[in-house]
Image (cartoon, rainbow, N blue to C red):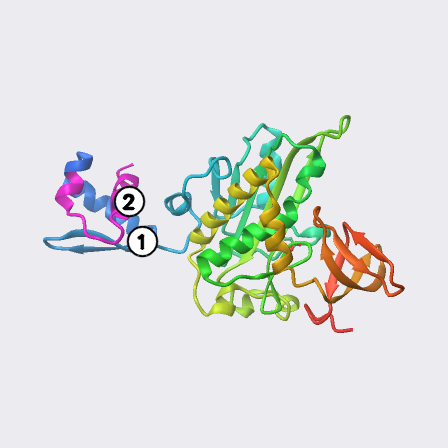
Amino acid sequence: MSKEKIFALLSAQAGDFVSGEDISAQLGISRAAVWKAVGALRRDGYTIEAQTGLGYRLADSPDVLSERELRRRLGETKIVGRTLECFESVDSTNSYLKRIAAEGAPDGAVAVADEQTAGRGRRGRSFSSGPGRGVYLSALLRPQLAPEKILPLTALGAVAACDAVERTCGVRPQIKWTNDLVLNGKKLSGTLTELSLEGESGALQYAVIGIGVNCNNASEDFPPELREVATSLYLETGKRVQRAVLAAALIEELDKLYAALQSGDTASYLTSYRRDCLTLGREVQLLWQDVKEKVTALDVDEQFGLVVRHEDGRVETIRTGEVSVRGLYGYVE
Ligand code: BTN
C-alpha cells in the first residue's frame, strides 16, 4: 500500500524531487519503509532517482498498460472508464466485456490488454494482438437508445480514435469506411463493435466497442501476410508511444462520444468523418456475399452509410459489406 501512496506523491511532483523525510512524515512510515517501496516501484519498471539532500524523483515510467499508469493519465470521465480492468493477457477485450456484461457489469466498463490471445476482427477474422506493442481496448455501453441510434457508434469510434491519436502522437490518421484508421496508406487500427439485442423486443441490451491500435510494432512484429498492409505509430513517426497515454486518451474520447450519442449531438463527428474519410471521391470495389463490383464513393450519409455511384449511373447507399479502396492495401485492379 505504501508503494501506491509513494507513487502518487512522486507522480504528483511531475519529475521534481521529494525528500525522504517529507514522504515518511506525510505517510507516517519509516525512512526504511520508503526505501523498500521505492525498490518495489523500481522492480515494476519505474526509474526513480535518489539523491542525498534532495530525496527521490520519478524520472521515467515503463511502457505498460497497468491500471496505475492509465489512471494517472486519465482525466475526469462521465461514464466510460469509471470501471477499468487492465490485463497482461486476455483472449479478447471484447469477449471479456461480453462475458461480464451478462453478469451485470456497469455502463462504461473498460477492459485494456497488453496482449490478446484470440483478438477478433470484423467478419470473423482474427486481429493480430501480440504483447507489448499495441493498445487493445474495449468499452461496454448500455445506452437507453433504440438500436438504430447506436449504429453510428462504429463509425464515430473511428473519429474518437483519430482524435486520441492526433492529440497524443501529433499525427491524424485517415478513415477507410467504415472504421479502419489508415496512416500513409497502411492500416493502423481497427474497430469491432458488437451489439446484444433482446430477442423478443429487439431492444438494445448493450454494445461493446473494441479498438486495436498498432503502437510500437516494428515491421517484423506483424505476421508476414500483414507486413505490406499494416503499420504502427512508431513505424510512421519514428517515435515510441507511451501506450498508457494513448489508452487514456482513447477512453476520454470514447466518453465524449458516448455523451454526444446520448444527446444526439453528433454533427461535428459527421463533419470530421467526412473530412477524414479517404474512401470518398475514389473508385472502390464492393465485396458483398462473393459479389465484386467497382463503384465510385460519393458521400457518407447521416447514418454513416456509403453513398456510391454504380457504373450504370445508379446511386445507392451501402450500409454493410466490405469496401476495398483502389491503390490501398494492395488493391490495384
Ligand atoms: C478489424 O480491423 O477487423 C477490427 C479489429 C478490432 C480489434 C479490437 S482490439 C480490442 C478489441 N478486442 C478484440 O478482440 N477486437 C477488438
Is residue 242 toward the left or the right of residue 290 in the image?
Answer: left
Question: Which residue position is annotated with label 1?
Answer: 46
User: Distance from label 1 to label 2 (Cα)?
Assistant: 10 Å
Q: Is residue 120 magenta?
A: no
Percent across and percent down for residue 302 are 70, 47
> Is residue 117 among what the camera can see?
no
Give neighbour class at mark 1: few <14, some 14-19, many 20+ (Cα, 10 Å).
some
Quarter placement of the C terminus:
bottom right
On residue 7, the disc is 2
Residue 228 location, quadrant: bottom right
Percent across and percent down for residue 121 are 66, 52
The residue shown at (66%, 39%) is: 150
Q: Amino acid at mark 1?
A: Tyr
Tell me whether the residue at label 1 lies in contact with that at label 2, contact meaning CB atoms closer than 8 angstroms: yes
| Foreground residue among 205 and 113 | 205
Is residue 104 toward the left or the right of residue 78 in the image?
Answer: right
